[in-house]
Image (cartoon, rainbow, N blue to C red):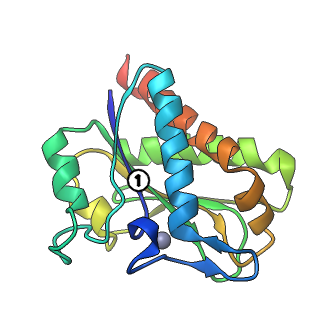
Amino acid sequence: MLIFINPGHAQGGMPDPGAVNMEANLRECDIAMTVGSLTGKYLEDAGCKVKLLQSHNLAGESPAYPNVTDTANISLADVFLSIHVNAGGGRGAETFCYWRYGAAGRLAGCIQAQLVQSLQPFDKGYADRGVKENKSLCVLRETCMPAVLVELGFIDSADVQLLKEHQDDMARALARGVTDYEKNWLKI
Ligand SMILES: [Zn+2]
C-alpha cells in the first residue's frame, strides 16, 4: 500500500505557517511536518510505501510550488492523509472526508478512533469530535484515492500540551489508523 502524506500549509512556514501559537512557540506547519514525517517512518516500518509533500499549492492555485493533489494522483497512492492543527479554542481531534459512507469515511473512522484512544489517556479533556464530511476542502475533493484530513488538536487551547509533548504518539496513532483500515477493509 502506498500512502501519500500531506503535512498542512507551507514548508518552513513561508508564505503560510497555518495556525500559530506565539506564546507556546508552536506553528501548525511545523507540527504537521514532524507528525507527518514520523507517521511515514512508522508506516514504512509496517511495510507500507510512503510519499510526503508539504506545499503551498494544493490544487494549482500557486503554480510556483509543487501541486499536492496532482502529485498524489500521479503517484497512484492508495490513501491520502493530510495533517493539520485546529485553531479557535475547542478541544480534541476531528477527521474530515468528502463522503462519510465511502472508503474515505472508513479510513477516517480508523484514524479518528486511534487518535482519541492514544491521546485521551494523557488528557481526558481531549475530545472525540468525530468524523465529519467536508465538500469544500480541495485535498479531499481533487484526489482520486480515499482521502482524509485530520485535525490533531487546537493550538490555542489546553490541547497545546499534547501538541507539544505527544507528537510521536500522534504519529503512531495515525500510522495505526492507516494499517487498521488496510487490515479491516482492504484485506477481506
Ligand atoms: Zn491547517
The percent coordinates of residue 141 (x first, y second) are: 25, 63
Q: From the viewer's side, name the closer residue of 5 and 128.
A: 5
Identify the image quadrant of residue 49: top left
The percent coordinates of residue 55 (x first, y second) are: 32, 64
Identify the image quadrant of residue 38: top right
Q: Quadrant of the N terminus?
A: top left
Above/below status of 139 relative to 157: above
Identify the amino acid type marked 1. Val
**Circle 1 residue:** 148
Q: Note whether residue 43 is visible.
A: yes
Tell me: 37 left or right of 186.
Answer: right
The percent coordinates of residue 152 (x first, y second) are: 61, 59
Q: From the viewer's side, name the closer residue of 132 and 65.
A: 65
Above/below status of 74 relative to 150: above
Tell me: 51 left or right of 16.
Answer: left
- Count residues near mark 1 (Cα–Cα under 10 Å), then give few for <14, some for 14-19, many for 20+: many
Above/below status of 11 relative to 16: above
Residue drawn at (53%, 36%) of the image: 175
Residue drawn at (49%, 49%) of the image: 36
Residue drawn at (42%, 79%) of the image: 16
Q: Note whether residue 184 is visible.
A: no
The percent coordinates of residue 179 (x first, y second) are: 49, 28
Above/below status of 15 relative to 188: below
Q: In which quarter of the image is the C terminus?
A: top left
Residue drawn at (22%, 68%) of the image: 65
Tell me: 1 left or right of 107.
Answer: left
Find out if the beta carbon at label 1 lies less than 8 Å from the nearest ligand 1 atom: no
